[in-house]
Image: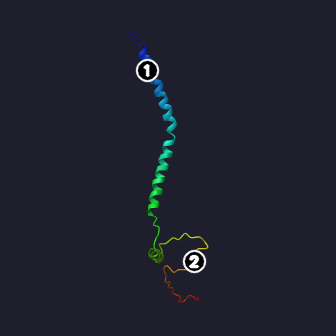
Amino acid sequence: MSLKPIEELARKIIVIHAKRCRRLFCVLPWIPACARELRDAEHLTTCMERINLVSTEQARELSRLNNRLYECVLQDEAKPQQDQVVSHVIIKADVRGSTR
C-alpha cells in the first residue's frame, strides 16, 4: 500500500485551504466598511420614514398654523415673507431709583 495518493490529497487540501485564506484576507478589510454603510443606510431609511409630504391644502394650512411646515419652494414661487409672531414675552423692570 502506497501513501502517495494520501500525500497528494493532503497537498491538494493545503493548496485549497491557502487559496481560501488568501480570499478571506482580501475580504476582511472591507467588512467594517460594509457594516458602517449598512448602519448608515438603516439610519437614512428611518429618517426618511419620518418625513411626511403634505398632499392636501387643508393639511398644509394646519401645518403652517402649528409652525410644523417646512416649505422648500423656488425663489420665484415663494410668497413674500412676513414676520410671524410665534410667541411673546412680557418683561417687567423695576425702575425706581434707576436715575441715581
Residue 94 spot, x, y in % from top left: 51, 87
Tell me the amino acid under the disc marked 2.
Lys
Say if 98 sits above or below 68 in the image.
below
Residue 89: image x %, image y %? 49, 81
Q: Secondary structure at mark 2?
A: loop
Q: Earlier in the sequence, mark 1 or mark 2?
A: 1
Q: Is residue 62 above or below residue 2?
A: below
Q: Whole-Å distance between the Cαs marked 1 and 2?
A: 80 Å
Q: State the residue in front, 52 or 21.
A: 52
Q: Residue at x 51, y 32 (%)?
A: 22
Most distant residue in the front direction: 56
Q: Secondary structure at mark 1?
A: helix
Which quarter shows the N terminus? top left
**Position in image of residue 50 (x %, y %):** 44, 63
Q: Residue at x 44, y 61 (%)?
A: 49
Is 57 situated above or below 96?
above
Q: Badges 1 and 2: C-beta atoms under 8 Å apart?
A: no
* Pointer 2 residue: 79
Which disc is residue 10 wearing? 1
Rendered residue at 43%/13% (across/down):
4
**Where residue 91 is drawn, which disc sits there?**
none
